[in-house]
Image (cartoon, rainbow, N blue to C red):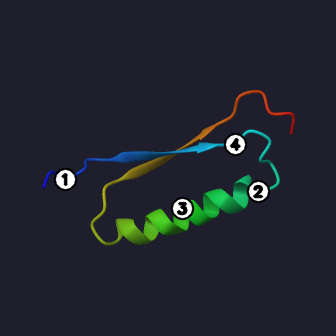
Amino acid sequence: MRRIESFTVVVPSYNEAATLRTNIEAIRAYLDARTLTDAAPWTILIVDDASSD
């Protein structure tokens, strides 16, 4: 099996100001726990296109 060098989690965030921090913290906690067990390096990419918040 081929090892993944790195990966990106894409998070759509249209009008998500109220929940974005909590969601990103949860994603980071999950990924941090896996990184300690030999998982690939990761990046979180937050995508927003003209939210009103």
Q: Nearer the viewer, mark 3 or mark 4?
A: 4
Q: Is residue 7 above or below residue 30?
A: above
Quadrant, the C terminus: top right
Q: Which residue is at the far right?
A: 52
Indicate the position of residue 7 as horizontal and vertical percent values.
37, 46
Amino acid type at circle 1 is Arg
Mark before the other along the chain sequence, 1 or 2: 1
Mark before the other along the chain sequence, 3 or 2: 2
Query: Mark 4 falls on what kind of element?
Result: loop
Query: Mark 1 falls on what kind of element?
Result: loop
Amino acid type at circle 2 is Thr
Q: Is residue 2 left or right of residue 16?
A: left
Q: CA distance from mark 1 to mark 4?
A: 30 Å
Which residue: 46% across, 47% down?
43
Which label was assigned to residue 19?
A: 2
Mark before the other along the chain sequence, 2 or 4: 4
Amino acid type at circle 4 is Ser
Q: Nearer the viewer, mark 3 or mark 2?
A: 2
Q: Is residue 39 left or right of residue 20?
A: left
Mark before the other along the chain sequence, 1 or 3: 1
Q: CA distance from mark 1 to mark 2?
A: 33 Å
Q: Which residue is mark 4?
A: 13
Which residue: 43% across, 45% down?
8
Which residue: 31% across, 56% down?
40
Which label was assigned to residue 3?
A: 1
Whether tag 3 and tag 4 are in contact, CB under 8 A, the answer is no
Crowding near pointer 2: few (<14 within 10 Å), some, many (20+)? Answer: few
Mark before the other along the chain sequence, 3 or 4: 4
Q: Which residue is at the far top?
A: 50
Q: CA distance from mark 2 to mark 4?
A: 9 Å
Q: Which residue is mark 3?
A: 28
